[in-house]
Amino acid sequence: MEIIPERSDDNKVMKFRVIGEDHTLLNALRERLLSYPEVEYAYYNVSHPLKSPYLLLPDNVSAPIDLRGLQQEVTFVFRVKEGNPKDLLKKAVDELLGEAEELVKIVDKIYEDHNKKR
């Protein structure tokens, strides 16, 4: 995943492009940002589906192409009513990371409990 910041004339708006990601991570980020009362709006736009890293070529065919140019590209934009958009983005990412870490702990416990029953 690559993140490319984009300039905005409005200091309440943050805009960036994300290369190599799709709805999975970015929808979670959008939903988290929208849960904050300080956020006015948050959305993302995914590039055309034909611009995708998945090529269906037979195993015996190789194509000298740059797969990076075919990766999914997403433009993410959000605006805050008050505060700093960078701070809210960091808060949202930190919270999502915390939830992911908690999920890993739950899965580990389930796996351990399953193995004890054997």
Image (tube, rainbow, N blue to C red):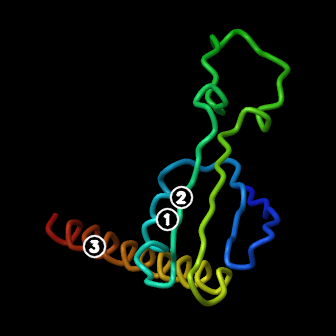
**Mark nearer the N terminus (2 vs 3):** 2
Quick one: label 1 or label 2, which is nearer the N terminus?
1
Residue at 54% across, 58% down: 43
Question: What residue sits right under mark 3 in the picture?
Answer: 112
Q: Position of residue 41 (x, y in %)?
A: 51, 68
In the displayed structure, does residue 55 sit left or right of residue 63?
A: left
Q: Is 15 in front, or is 69?
A: 15
* Labelled pair 1, 2 in contact (Cβ < 8 Å): yes
Task: Tell me whether circle 2 and circle 3 mark residues in contact (CB < 8 Å).
Answer: no
Among all residues in the image, which is located at the extreme left? 117
| Mark seen at residue 43 | 2
Q: Which residue is mark 1?
A: 30
Q: How many marks?
A: 3
What percent of the width, then of the height, locates residue 104? Answer: 40, 72
Residue type highlighted by circle 2: Tyr
Circle 3: residue type: Glu
Percent position (x, y) of residue 87? 64, 86
Res 32 quadrant in image: bottom left
Question: Helix, strand, or loop for circle 2?
Answer: strand
Residues at marks 1 and 3 touching, judged by CB atoms closer than 8 Å: no
Q: Which mark is residue 91?
A: none
Kindly indicate the quadrant of the structure image that contains residue 82.
bottom right
Q: CA distance from mark 1 to mark 2?
A: 6 Å
- Classed neighbour count for the residue bearing mark 1: other residues with Cα under 10 Å, few (<14), some (14–19), many (≥20): many
Numbered disc 3: secondary structure: helix
Helix, strand or loop at mark 1:
helix
Q: Residue at x 65, y 40 (%)?
A: 72
Three-letter residue code for mark 1: Arg
Q: Residues within 10 Å of mark 2 (few under 14, many from 20)?
A: some
